[in-house]
Image (cartoon, coloured by chain):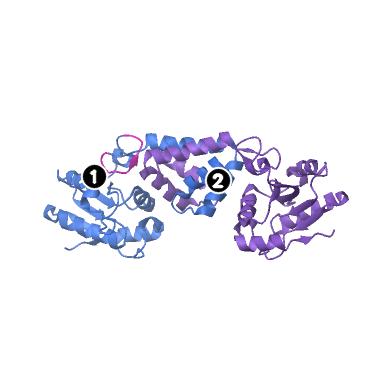
Chain colours: A blue, B purple
Amino acid sequence: MYEGIVQDLIDELGRLPGVGPKSAQRIAFHLLAAEPVDVRRLAEVLLEVKAKVRFCSICGNVAESEECRICQDTRRDLTVICVVEEPKDVVAVERTREFRGRYHVLGGAISPIEGIGPDDLRVKELMTRLADGTVIELILATDPNIEGEATATYLARLVKPMKLTVSRLASGLPVGGDLEYADEVTLGRAFEGRRRLEV
Amino acid sequence: MYEGIVQDLIDELGRLPGVGPKSAQRIAFHLLAAEPVDVRRLAEVLLEVKAKVRFCSICGNVAESEECRICQDTRRDLTVICVVEEPKDVVAVERTREFRGRYHVLGGAISPIEGIGPDDLRVKELMTRLADGTVIELILATDPNIEGEATATYLARLVKPMKLTVSRLASGLPVGGDLEYADEVTLGRAFEGRRRLEV
């Protein structure tokens, strides 16, 4: 319905998660009316983020250099690793201030329906990190839904021969939900009450 | 909570209308995981849209050249002007296929609360278009809310000496709503049943 480039913009915005056609149109007209310098800044951040952001060579979290800020931080406890699905889950756990170890970002969860198996996740990288015996505790903080539970169970079985302390975040998190939406207190409680996984 | 540029992206996205902090984060991580070429395309469309899109010198609608497609279309009826608030309202009316005249986009509505008066809208440009006597009918299709009604009444009084046929879209549109959200049938009916404005 719109002329060339305006429709292109609406189409591109409509591809973003959670942005429907009406929202895309609303955002597009907001941008048309906005100061050129503001729109330019958004465009530049988009280009810059893809150029600059990479993934930490140790934990897989987003980083602006070879290693992320957390892996570079020498005050963090090297004997504990908290395994999460996505970089945004690292932020959620950090907000609780309950955890002083390091992370391992899997890049998703095991999901047979979506065809995602252990080989599609950063499982091999986790095993490499565990090989030298520095890590003695593993906290499996994957999402409290079917895929997250399956991933936690898979990992617990995989590391069983290593005699690590393996735990799963305590219930208290709403089941079927997304880890990133938990409030700080609930997530903090879940950290305190984490239970040993017996497989 | 995030490292430099990732937080910048979340902040920029959070400034868009209808995008809260959680949505901004979700979109940001979607973009981080997306193909660089897709993100580049979005960034380029953003830059291009601000460089290319201007406003039609006749009606004020968005256009990629001096005049918009509708004003360039010689098959449109030059004797009728439909006055709307925003370019998106032009699209809403066009979808009804009930109207074959031309448009005049005001760029908003009179709103004393927001400090928007007639001088902030394209009212002077409308009066210039009406001056040569070609236009004999004016359809006031501003939004059916307080600001839109006030704007319609103001315009009707302003053009009264010109002896034009002045009408307002028929009721049928939900009052207090936004013109752009009306479905085609409702908006089409409202066009058919437009009533003469007596002031």
Q: Looking at this view, name the residue that lies furthest to the left.
A: A161
- Determine whether the residue tagged by mark 1 lies in a helix, strand or loop: loop
In the image, what residue occupies the spot 51% across and 53% down?
A21
Where, quadrant-wise, is the C terminus of chain A in this rendering?
bottom left
Q: Is residue A195 above or below residue B105?
A: below
Residue B151: tell me if it is visible: no
Identify residue for label 1: A78
Could you say where residue A149 lies in the image, as x and y percent from the top left? 26, 61
- Numbered disc 1: what chain? A
Based on the displayed image, in which of its 4 quarters is residue B132 positioned?
A: top right
Drawn side of residue B136 relative to residue A35, left or right: right
Q: Nearer the viewer, residue B54 or A94?
A: B54
Q: Nearer the viewer, residue A58 or A110?
A: A110
Please state which amino acid type lies under the numbered disc 1: Leu
Question: Mark 1 or mark 2, which is nearer the start of the sequence?
Answer: 2
Q: Is residue A167 above or below residue B40?
A: below
Q: Is residue B100 shown in magenta? A: no
Q: Which residues are magenta?
A: A57-65
Q: Nearer the viewer, residue A192 or A42?
A: A42
